[in-house]
Amino acid sequence: MNFVIKPPWFRSKNGFLLYMAFNISVFGICWHTKRKKYTAEKKSIIEESQIREQEHLVAVQESQEEIIRLQNEKLQAEIAFKNQELTSYTYHLVSKNELISEIKKAIQKLGPKFENDRELKKEFKTIMQLTDQNAGIDDDWDNFVKSFDQVHSEFFKRLTEKYTNLSSNDYKMCTYLRMNLTSKEISALMNISLRSVETNRYRLRKKLGLHSEANLTQYLLRY
């Protein structure tokens, strides 16, 4: 009688299938673990990259905002300096013209004393002409307008575009009112009487189309 000895189970066909299934399972687990780790690392790298990119964008924006802030501060400082210069120049002219006006009044009192002396009378007229010529800012008006426009954001340009019927004296009046000068100061600058200033204000109000209750100075300050 012949006996057939079967191989142990781990060397059988089923054993090999079991080994294969086990190896495949181990491989699958390892592959899944590595893939999961790779995915997590990739996600972490992307998130870190996004964070760094966001931080960079924030830094760039803050840098740009800081540059803009510094530029604005510089511009405001320049405007403030120009405004101070313009104001100082204006009040210097006011003082000068007030002084000339006082000198003119004093000289006029001497006029009758020169009526009988032709030479002195001629000199008197010359002095009176000199005082008139040195009053006002007509010679420096163009430079004054340029400096004024730099401080007050093209005030004249906007004014001329909207109101085409204004005279040169109207523009001067608008300028002085925009600087919030008093009628007395305007009188000294334009070398005219206070009554003439009020008359000019009234005519200007009509040309600008303002009703009687409107404040002319406040209108121009907001213009």
Image (spheres, rainbow, N blue to C red):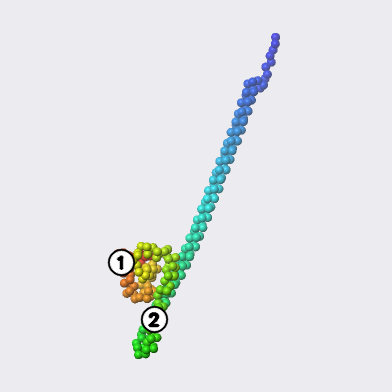
Residue 206 is marked as 1
Q: Is residue 180 visible?
A: no
Q: Position of residue 36 (x, y in %)?
A: 58, 36
Q: Secondary structure at mark 2?
A: helix
* Nearer to us in this view, 223 or 35: 223
Q: Is residue 140 visible?
A: yes
Q: Is residue 92 left or right of residue 195?
A: right
Amino acid type, callout 1: Lys
Q: Against 44, is 124 above or below?
A: below
Q: Position of residue 124 (x, y in %)?
A: 38, 85
Q: Quadrant of the N terminus?
A: top right
Q: Secondary structure at mark 1?
A: helix
Residue most extreme to the left: 212
For the residues labelled 2 and 1, the Cα–Cα distance comes to 34 Å
- The residue labelled by disc 2 is 129
Residue most extreme to the bottom: 116
Q: Residue at x 52, y 51 (%)?
A: 58
Residue 121 is marked as none
